[in-house]
Amino acid sequence: MIKKLIGRLLGKAGVKTRAAPLGKRVEIGAEQHGIDHKLIDERAVRVVSTLQQAGHEAYIVGGAVRDLLLGLPPKDFDVATNATPEQVKALFRRAFIIGRRFRIVHVIFGRGRDHEVIEVSTFRALLDASAADHVSGNEKSAKHELTGKSHVIDAEGRVLRDNVWGPQIEDAARRDFTVNALYYDPTRQIVVDYHNGWRDATRRVLRMIGDPAARYREDPVRIVRVWRFAAKLGFAVDAKTQAPIRELAGLLANVPASRMFDEMFKLLQTGHAQKSLDVLRAQALPPGLFPLLDVVLDPAQRDAARERFIGLALADTDRRVAEGLAVAPSFLLACLLWHEVVQRWRALQARGEAPFPALQQAVDAVFDARIGDISGRGKLAADMREIWQMQPRFERRSGNTPRALVEQPRYRAGYDFLRLRADAGEASAELAEWWEDFALGDDDERVALLQAVRERDKVRRVAKPPAASGAAAGVHRAT
Ligand code: ATP
Ligand code: MG
């Protein structure tokens, strides 16, 4: 009764945004949640206990708790605390405060390939639009202090500064889905739940916290997240969470390319890339929202050969994720864009452009059309270009080319790409096998492999005039 009254008073006061209700703290004990501690990263536990011993609240939070409840091994662990970033940093030997708009701490363990990052974020206060500093475009740089009592919001409603700390109950209300707003205290072994996330996890339902339409308006990327989690978790989407999506999907057009790309890419790296595409297809979205995926989603742009190739690439990606292997964005992107790049590359060469500048121009044009201005674009494009440039070189199996090629640091990616082309029927299976043998072979075996190709070519030359091989290979013969 009293709580209801307080709730109503708070509501009436209207101080805080009411897109999401605050909810009520519920603690769920070990006998109920049944979380298997073997699935918990001991470093995450160490971060939590270090913070707790220093007198702070600390929990494992978000996707990791959700996955633990489902009995899945989380891919990474995030920690949430009421300690400020400075207080967190002071407690660990290797910890770095990162981000401006949204400051968090990276606590680093181990070195090199085995290093691991535990991301620690401070509980965020509810967005309080009425008390926020509203700035216009020109003022953005003036309002640069990192923390303060209020949020800073620009004319489009984008939050420029989100470093206002609050209690856990507010932090929970700012998260997207009920199953993503769970906190786990490994010390007391309790799950803390404000929005019936535990119930939804057991019923396998994806439900937005608060009023779905308002939450999508606040951040349209949440629409993509619905699709991602529906595909990844195999959850049903709650009817009210689903209802406004069709009408609001157009808001995605205003999301900065960089964020859209990140979120969309996560969708392909869920380990259920093919299923994710099915989910997207079922939405019948207007073309242009994901230019990168229009090649497989937009009926007007579909092409059988391309789809076969991309289908194989996605199946390969899903297999890699299932085996716990890394998926390089550059490789997957190289697959998605390959046919388009080849087409432009070929057209430019037909107009007399030399192979290398032609490839460069083709890559730039395709990036502009499909990806836009994202951070790290230069490095990504360079990695992809290496993979593509290796393809015509695989056709040249004489002299020193093969030895030099297998020594290249990115050979494996280039070879995997060739393998996919062979599986899709675009390159010969014999060619892919030859390179596998060559790469693994010792000196004598390599000499024999080169010899065998020479012999075969001799026979062919006698038997018939040379014919162009493989669709893509014919293009850049000149490289
Ligand atoms: P995954 O295991 O696929 O990484 P995740 O739940 O950890 O899933 P992240 O994108 O890593 O997803 O986000 C971490 C947490 O941050 C989420 O669980 C959610 O609580 C919160 N979050 C992330 N993005 C948003 C958003 N756009 N709106 C509200 N909360 C968000
Ligand atoms: Mg995560």
Image (tube, helix red, strand yellow):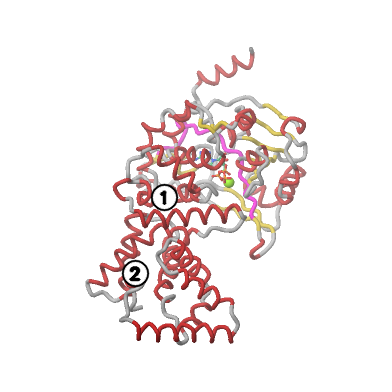
Relative placement, left or right, of 283 versus 121 is left
- In the figure, 12 relative to 363: above or below? above
The residue that appears at 65% across and 38% down in the rendered structure is: 70
Q: Residues in magenta?
A: 117-134
The residue that appears at 67% across and 61% down in the rendered structure is: 114
Relative placement, left or right, of 305 versus 117 is left
- The quadrant of the rendered image in which ligand 1 is seen is top right
In the rendering, at what x and y percent does residue 50 appear? 75, 47
Q: Which residue is mark 1?
A: 141
At mark 1, the secondary structure is: loop
- Please tell me which of labels 1 and 2 falls first in the chain: 1
Relative placement, left or right, of 439 versus 219 is right
- Label 1 is placed on what type of residue? Ser
Q: Which residue is mark 2?
A: 360
| Outermost left residue | 351
Q: Name the mark on residue 357.
A: none
- Label 2 is placed on what type of residue? Gln
Q: Quarter holding the C terminus?
A: bottom left
In the rendering, at what x and y percent does residue 286 appear? 32, 41
> Which of the two marks, 1 or 2, is nearer to us in this view?
2
Spatial CA distance of label 1 from label 2 is 35 Å
Q: Picture quarter containing residue 337?
A: bottom left
Which class describes the residues within 10 Å of circle 1: few (<14), some (14-19), or many (20+)? Answer: few
Is residue 33 located in the magenta-colored stretch of the structure? no
In the rendering, at what x and y percent does residue 6 appear? 60, 17
